[in-house]
Image: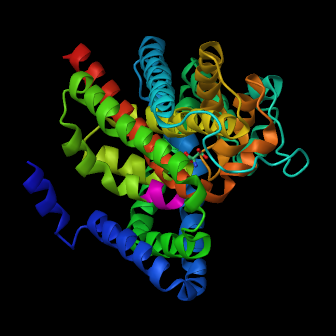
Amino acid sequence: MVAGFLKGLLDWRKVENQTLYAVILAVLLGVVLPNFAQPLKVVGDIFLRLLKSIAIPLVMASIFVSIASLRGMEELKELGIKALVYYTATTFLAVLTGLVVVNLFFGIGETNITPPSAGHFEPKQVSLYDFFVGFFPDNIFKALAEGKVIQIIVFTILFALGVLAIVQNLKGKETVINFFSGMNDALLNVAQWVIKLTPLGVFAIVYYNVAVHGLSAFAELWKYALAVLVGLFWHAFVNLGLITYVFAKAKPWEYFAKVREALLVAFSTASSSATLPVSLEVAEKKAGVDKKVTGFVLPLGATVNMDGTALYEAVAAMFVASVYGIHLSLEQQIIILITATLAAIGAAGIPSAGLVTMTLVFSAVGLPLEGIAIILAIDRFLDMFRTAVNVWGDLIGAKVIDTLLRRKNS
Ligand code: ASP
């Protein structure tokens, strides 16, 4: 089984393998020949723009089509509840894993980093009011233009229900459904073409990032980075692996092999939203998950289900507290559990979004916000890993929910 998987990795004609080789080569070149990276920025930027340009209309079209193809309110409720239970449970589990790892990893005041003083770095604080009100759009066109994905999702769900509720103007109803369905297919075609460019795009992005950010920042922060990575790997392969095995009745490594292109794109772009076109494509075409499920679970998951981000926020809070010599009690760690889950839900699927919503966690337990500056230097690097885990969590969610629905309907 492992031998088969490794043998599969050698087939250089597969785009997912070319992307993997591209990542490895880019890391090596970024370390050895950092001076040649600059001209590649344009290639990486164009690739990212192509992905991002399809992501927003795709969120709308795929959620709309998915709801329109359901048999009614009952089925939507079922899909929605299953998705929400899955998202919350796995995010909670991720934070819990992060807290366990971090408690095993460092004690207080163990590092020799000097905590920054106030005024050194002032991140904008996210308030709970803004957080909740921010889910609702006041102008859908503004939300679309600004890429406010949660607002777009809320609007699309309402709009799709509105269309389904049309009883008299059936021709109009059909036209709107056909329009979005055609739009969805067209965007997925474009996604397929862009995917052909992933080895090149991913090579450029990773090469540039490794060359620019370098590896020197690790000297002081290696323990923190290690704690985040151990937590992420444990969650991705043990927790989510078991969930795949038990609830989706599938072998996690086989599923991993099928969807790995999306994980590599997530890793290099550090953006769940930009990865969405690829996730939809691999889940449907390579892993055979029902379009109705992927169309709902993946776009929603790309913004609200962020296991990796939640885990990292918890570890970061604990680490910064230890730098300041602050002891966080069990009660405070429970507050971290809740706020990190919320903060991850509120984080957008773009690079460094977790860094912004982390202020929610810091304020909840009274940590100085400027402490976030401590972890900035290696944030882009960790973002790559946590985004890959975020997308992996979404893809497993789609598989689990697909299996549960199929079982019920058979
Ligand atoms: N970059 C992450 C994502 O797109 C969010 C974050 O943790 O910053 O999923």
Q: Which residues are magenta?
A: 265-270
Residue drawn 59% across and 86% down? 39
Q: Looking at the picture, how far across and down is residue 86, in whole percent?
A: 43, 22
**Residue 169 appears anywhere in the view:** no
Residue drawn 21% across and 73% down? 12
Res. 368 image quadrant = top right
**Residue 359 appears anywhere in the view:** yes
The C terminus lies in quadrant: top left
Give the vertical position of 204 relative to 337 (above or below): below
Q: How is the image coloured?
A: rainbow
Res. 332 image quadrant = top right
Side of 301 where 366 appears, left or right: right
Q: Looking at the picture, how far across and down is residue 375, in whole percent?
A: 66, 50
Camera-nearest residue between 151 and 255? 255
Give the tally of numbered discs.
0
Residue drawn 43% across and 38% down? 231
Q: Looking at the picture, how far across and down is residue 89, in whole percent?
A: 45, 20
Side of 112 where 252 appears, left or right: left
Side of 352 where 26 appears, left or right: left
Camera-nearest residue between 205 and 162? 205
Residue drawn 52% across and 54% down? 222
> Is 268 one of the magenta-colored residues?
yes
Camera-nearest residue between 172 and 71? 71
Side of 256 where 35 appears, left or right: right
Q: Looking at the picture, how far across and down is residue 406, in whole percent?
A: 24, 22
> Is 317 one of the magenta-colored residues?
no
Prevailing secondary structure of the magenta residues: helix
